[in-house]
Image (tube, helix red, strand yellow):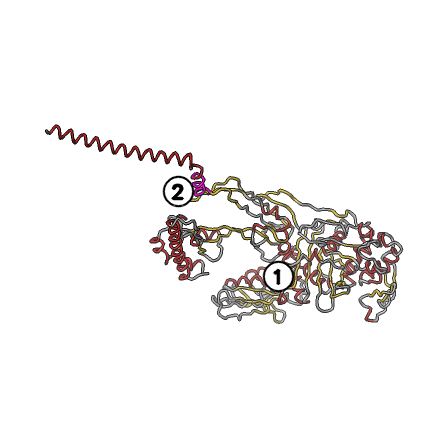
Amino acid sequence: MAQDNKNKRKAVVINRYGWVVMAFLVIFIVIFAYIIRIMFVEGEEWRALGEKETIKRDREIKPVRGNIYACDGRLLATSEPLYGVYMDFMAEGIRKDTLMKYVDELSKTLAKKFPDRSSAQYKKVILDGWELSRKEIAEIEKAKAEGSDKKVRTKSRHIRLIKRDINYVQLKELRTFPFLNQRSNRSGLYTEERSQREKPFGRLAGRTIGSIYKDAALGGASGVELKYDSILRGKPGIKSRQKIQGRWIDIVEVPATDGLDVVTTIDVDIQDITENALRDKLIETDAESGTAIVMEVTTGEIKAISNLDRQTKGEYAEGNPNAFSYMNEPGSTFKTLSMMVALEDGVVRPEDKFHVGTGLYQYKGKWVRDHYWQRGQDRGDITAAEGMHISSNIVLAKTILKGYENDPTKYVQRLHDLGITRKIDWDVPLKGKEGTAVIRFPDDKANYWSKTTLPWMAFGYETQIPPIYILMFYNGIANNGTMIKPFTTKAFLKDGKIQEEFSTEVINPSLCSERTLNEIKEMLVGVVNEGTGKAIRCDEFQVAGKTGTAQIASGGGYAGHFVSFCGYFPAEAPKYTIFVGIRKPKGIPSGGLMPGAVFKRIAQEVYSRNTFITPKDCPVDSTLTKMPYTKAGRYDQTEKVLASLNIPYQFSETDAQWIRTNITDNNLELHKSTVHEGLVPDVHGMGAKDALFLLEEAGLKVAINGYGKVRSQSLTAGSRAVKGSRITLELK
């Protein structure tokens, strides 16, 4: 009986085991069937979906835009990576309890580092983002449950955490903040990188350097940035992103090729001198606009180029490329071209005389006037050289009529032969006729040649020549007759190595004979020493050049004046050629007093910048009757200079760091000046360098007007110094 029961139990177990095996077998068959179906029937679809979720292909790698450098290697423009900071509140690893634990501490830390928002505002952004993500997840789940294809827009995946973009150093610090110091799939933190163009010297040479579009993908918008955009921008690469263990990893397939660097000929110091000199004169004369260009004589390198246009409230900023776009009649600076042609053809000699009388000469019913004609002064006869000195329109008109009245085509052809109308590919992007010179031939049917065109062309009318061509011509005179192209791009670099270098391009190897060249040079020196350029004369070195004043053609008549001066220095061994032009200044127009003053200031400052002397070169004469001008400043530096020059002074203190100076009865007295922490320093009598150091040490923002020593300061010395306050210094 027991055996039967045992057999029955065994049969039941085997029977049950069989059913279990059968069940597992069925399950296995079903699973296997699904595997076969997934692999071979739905395989392509699932593989595509899996790849889509774990691999993102053909994503662009943005190249780094090349830098733009000054001639000495200082940065004029560079690209700085910036990052927009966002949070994805649907990140798979983000946890509510962890977020809530750190939200207060995180908000306070963010507010301290990035005060665009308060701590409470940061907390609200984070909590609102979290609540929004929960609502959106609920909507997604609801749509799935209903079998709806409705796509829920997930705004919570792209919540901007910090209002402004931040740099890489700030981003590294951000990743150490509470909660954000976790892996990105747990913190939800992610960034979007973009490139911002930075100019370390601000607006300096702004029109020449140019700019890029706000959308960096569009590239350069103006200046060198536009001209060499294809060189600077580089070539993008390709990468894919693969999700591995919950983290996205970049896999580079084709690396990006960064842009080449561009080295310009611009000298930052000379550029600064030039812009300040031009801007001050434009403000003084309330002019419409102006341009100033400094060119190195033997190389053609443009060391400075400033193009300033009047903005609102009398301010001036870089605008149009005036050096190339002033397509107006140049006026009397053109007389040098006419005189060179006439001298070379033997039409005139410097000593030949012409009758100018009271400054009125009528030719075919039209009056030619000299600038002094209203004074009633009768100058009688003057030489051709004197005519150049005083900028006589009559002398130039009579000279050109004498030689070419019966064959005006010869005169125009000789001007063209100089190379002044040659089409040149400039280093800046231009539009239409900008950067070209127009001198019409008598048979020009498109532009009518009148019966008085020839004499008026002789003194700078009936032509269109932008400043850059006038500069190029005068530089040719300074360069012993070899006219070369002015240029601003020196080389292209890759990783600091030269890829392509630009050298001097000769436009005309010989403007004229040596005899004519020497005669022209003497005339240009005479303009400065004896004529319309007297105001430009310098004690330190000889200047040679020519003034120019022309009425601006407008609507069939004339409106306003264009005044200019072009010349070079030192005249005996020229180093630089400078053109300065001012458009529509207020007051009596004068090429010598307006642009000439700018030329003189640039020339003197550039000359002194390149002049090196020792105390032995300037000993104090025993017959010294007046104590030399001495600025306030650091005692140790002042004492060193005075001792080196053997200049006596009175000073009783021993521990002074800063001093004031005073001259009484021709005795130099030094007085201790105490600087108190938290108070505005007294910088009267100091130079800009010392004053700037002291004021910035006190936490003040400094604006400086003028040159020399401090005459006044907008914040009273000894008053409380509030950090960040602005103080204006007037120097004279």
Would you identify the image quadrant in which residue 587 lies? bottom right
Quarter holding the N terminus is top left
Is the residue 635 above or below the residue 156 in the image?
below
Instruction: Name the residue furthest right.
Output: 406
| Classed neighbour count for the residue bearing mark 2: other residues with Cα under 10 Å, few (<14), some (14–19), many (≥20) | few
The answer, for residue 476, to whether it is visible in the render is yes
Q: Amino acid at mark 1?
A: Asn
User: Helix, strand, or loop for circle 1?
Assistant: loop
Would you identify the image quadrant in which residue 461 lies? bottom right
Question: Is 463 contained in the magenta span?
Answer: no
Q: Position of residue 592 (x, y in %)?
A: 74, 63
Circle 2 is placed at which residue position? 245
Q: Position of residue 189 (x, y in %)?
A: 42, 51
Quarter holding the C terminus is bottom right
Q: Which residues are magenta?
A: 46-55
Whichever of callouts 2 and 1 sits on the residue coming sooner in the sequence is 2
| Of the pair 480 and 595, the residue shown nearer to us | 595
Q: Residue 396 — which label? A: none
Asked if labels 1 and 2 touch by Cβ distance under 8 angstroms, the answer is: no
| Classed neighbour count for the residue bearing mark 1: other residues with Cα under 10 Å, few (<14), some (14–19), many (≥20) | few
Q: Amino acid at mark 2?
A: Gln
Circle 1 is placed at which residue position? 646
Question: Is 47 contained in the magenta span?
Answer: yes
User: Helix, strand, or loop for circle 2?
Assistant: loop
> Which residue is at a point 13% across and 30% down the rendered structure image?
5
